[in-house]
Image: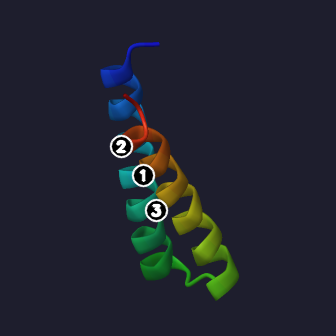
Amino acid sequence: MKPNLLKTICGGIALGMGVAVIATNIANPLSFTSLTNLLGIAVAALGLAFLQK
């Protein structure tokens, strides 16, 4: 897979998770553990995106 494409996909996943956290907090607030899991996935995606050569 091309590095630029992977970076774009991982950035989109991270952005999507951030939006999901905000949207779910407005609609139906989640527990702290659930929010941490969602944001952890976002940080992991950003880590994968920026560790590419």
Question: Which residue is nearer to you in this view: 40 or 17?
Answer: 40
* Three-letter code, disc 3: Ala
Dot 3 crowding, Cα within 10 Å, few <14, some 14–19, many 20+: some
> Is any part of residue 31 visible from this angle?
no
Q: Quadrant of the C terminus?
A: top left
Q: Which residue is mark 3?
A: 20
Q: What secondary structure is marked by label 2?
A: helix
Q: How is the image coloured?
A: rainbow
The answer to whether the residue labelled 2 contacts the one labelled 1, judged by CB atoms less than 8 Å apart, is: yes
Q: Is 9 situated above or below 46?
A: above
Tell me the CA gap for discs 2 and 1. Answer: 5 Å
* Residue 12 image-quadrant placement: top left
> Is any part of residue 3 visible from this angle?
yes
* Residue farthest toward the front in the current orientation of the protein: 53
Tell me the CA gap for discs 3 and 1. Answer: 10 Å
Q: Is 27 situated above or below 15?
A: below
